[in-house]
Structures are given as C-alpha cells and as structure tokens.
Image: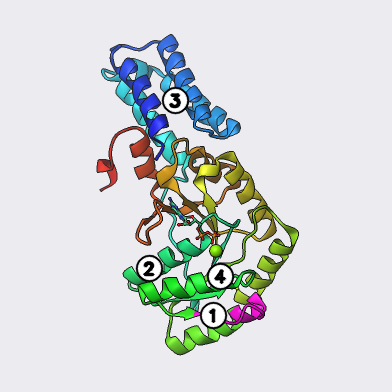
Amino acid sequence: MLELLSEKIGNVFKSLSGKGRLNEKDVDEAVRQVRLALLEADVNLKVVKEFTSKVRERSLTNQVLQSLTPAQQVIKIVHEELIAILGGKQSWLVPAGHPPSRLMLVGLQGGGKTTTAAKLALHLRRSGQNPLLVAADTRRPAAIEQVIILGKQLDIPVYAEDHKVAPATICTQAVKRAKELAASWLVVDTQGRLHIDETMMEELVEVKKALQPSEVLLVVDAMTGQEAVRVAEEFNARVGLTGLILTKMDGDARGGAALSIKSVTGVPIKFIGMGEKVDAFEPFHPDRLASRILGMGDMLTL
Ligand SMILES: Nc1nc2c(ncn2[C@@H]2O[C@H](COP(=O)(O)OP(=O)(O)O)[C@@H](O)[C@H]2O)c(=O)[nH]1
Ligand SMILES: [Mg+2]
C-alpha cells in the first residue's frame, strides 16, 4: 500500500537528514521532490498544492532552520500535514438514536460493496454488536445469493426477498425483522452499476428514504485513483454520504485516492479494505497511514 510514494518520500528525507543545517534552498528542493512524489501517486493537484505550501511555510521558520535537528522537524511537519489531509482523527460509526442502527452501503459495481457488507457485519459482531445483513441489490439474483452465502459462512443472519420486491420495501421489512431478532445494526447492500447512472441514484435515494440510515458509506476502489474521488463527489451530491470505505488498498501502488478523497469531498474515510478475505478490513487511522507513508511504522499510535 502506497509503497512507491513511501519509498520516494523516504529518499527525500534521507538526503535532507544528511545535510545537517538546512537553508531555504534545501527546504524548497525537498518540498519540490515531495510534490513530484505525490503527483506521481495520483494525488489531486489542488490537494498537493495546499499541502506543499503549508509544509514549506511551516518549515521555513527560524525555529525549524536553526534547530539542532532541522530535517527531523521537517519530517514532523510533513507527518502532521499528512494526517491533516487524511482527515485528522479517526472517524467512528455513528449509531442511531434508537436501535436498530441502519447502515447503507453504496457504490459502483465491482468496487467491493457486497464483500464489504460481510466484512462490516463481521467487524460489528466482533465489536459486540448484533448485525443483520440485508440483501437489497435486487438487480441480479446472484447478488442476493452472494449475501446469503456470506451470511452462512459467517453465521450472521441475512434478510433477503425475491429479486422482484422493491429494495425500499425490503429495507422496511428488514427493519421489522431486525427488531424481532434484537439486531443492533442493519448492514444494507445495494445495487451498483459500472458507471454513475440516473436509475441507480434514484433507487438509492428511495432506499435511503425508507431506511433512514445513520450511516451512508460509499465503497470505492482505491485503485481507480482520481476517478474514485470523482465518484465520491457525485454520490455525495446525489445521495449524501456520511463516510467512505476504500477497498483494494492491498493492491494499490499509487493510492492517491486515499490522500485526496477526504480533502476534496469533505467526507471522512472510515474503513479500508486490504484484501479479498472477510477479515482483511480495518478502521481507518489517519495517523497510522501517515506514519506508514513516512516509513515510521505503526509504532507511533500503538
Ligand atoms: N484485493 C482486494 N479485493 C477486494 C477487496 N474488496 C473486494 N474485493 C474484490 O472485488 C471484487 C468485487 O467485489 P464485490 O463485493 O462483489 O463488489 P460489488 O459489485 O461492489 O458488490 C471481488 O472479487 C472481491 O473479492 C479488497 O479490499 N481487496
Ligand atoms: Mg454486489
């Protein structure tokens, strides 16, 4: 995950650390290199500009330049600014005022929605919750079957109906079932298309109206880079999002989506998917990813 970016930034700091005292030219050169590395990782241009100008401004102070460990100070500034663009603090799931809490997953086809529904349900159960999976992607009978199979594998109850039943109706019924089962969270899988599509958006708005979710999470493939950012903007404008889940972070060498998406959309990343297996899933920690990019390991926040 983001190995290439990490390696490039590591090299910048290695040469900076070798210098001892730093002057304005050294800082400018380092900032330029970091900027190139970020652009190569497909980070949004505006985000890169704001980030580098903040780093430059904070680094070119007497306090930094005249310190005994100026390179260390610059790295610390980069670390802090990376955390800031990644969203600052960790964002938790927001439960409903009255149980059951309702969580709706949206996203394009193939992004990992259904897999993520199962991962989330498992995550919730491991956190002491009682989840109910809801198969509300009725476009393909196979999608319903996929949720049923995942539910069986994980021993998590699934609410499903015939694919001819409207998704909004399924959701209303599922809330009733959740109450009977004393389920604390509904995790709702919805339909996706290959591209942004009017019919899909209308259906999602209907489902949202019926479900009244406290969480609407967009599941988006991190490997699609800037496209992921565009998709997030569109879904946020049309359906309204409370959070993002970036999938396929395991296969992502560039990974600029992770670094741009919060700053551009204003929507926080809540989880990341790290593989096809159901437990390859974790809450998103901005500080951990920033540390990982800077090769500091996960030590800082453990
Ligand atoms: N490597 C990797 N593959 C994933 C991840 N999440 C989902 N997938 C795969 O992406 C493909 C599409 O997933 P699916 O859940 O069916 O997507 P949906 O169409 O959005 O419901 C499947 O082959 C999943 O195994 C992830 O975090 N990492
Ligand atoms: Mg699906």
Q: Mark yes or no: residue 213 visible.
A: no
Question: Which numbered disc, 3 or 2, marks the residue that appears first in the sequence?
Answer: 3
Q: Residue 226: x and y, percent?
A: 59, 39
Alpha carbon separation for disc pair 2 and 4: 21 Å
Picture residue at 41% right of the left edge, 19% below the top: 61
The amino acid type, in three-letter code, at marker 1 is Ala
Q: Secondary structure at mark 1?
A: loop
Q: Secondary structure at mark 2?
A: helix
Assess whether mark 4 and mark 3 are in contact (beta carbons under 8 angstroms). no
Alpha carbon separation for disc pair 2 and 1: 18 Å
Assess whether mark 4 and mark 2 are in contact (beta carbons under 8 angstroms). no
Picture residue at 35% right of the left edge, 27% below the top: 75
Mark 1 packing: few (<14 Cα in 10 Å), some, or many (20+)? many
Question: Which numbered disc, 1 or 4, marks the residue that appears first in the sequence?
Answer: 4
The residue singled out by tag 1 in the image is 160
State whether residue 177 is above or below residue 198.
below
Quarter occupied by residue 225? top right
Picture residue at 69% right of the left edge, 68% below the top: 203
Q: Which mark is residue 122?
A: 2
Q: Residue 180: x and y, percent?
A: 47, 89
Q: How is the image coloured?
A: rainbow
Quarter occupied by residue 276? bottom left
Question: Which numbered disc, 2 or 4, marks the residue that appears first in the sequence?
Answer: 2
Alpha carbon separation for disc pair 1 and 3: 55 Å
The residues colored magenta run 159-170
The residue singled out by tag 3 in the image is 58
Specify whether residue 160 is painted magenta: yes
The amino acid type, in three-letter code, at marker 4 is Ala
Mark 4 packing: few (<14 Cα in 10 Å), some, or many (20+)? few
The amino acid type, in three-letter code, at marker 2 is Leu
State whether residue 36 is above or below residue 173.
above
The residue singled out by tag 4 in the image is 142
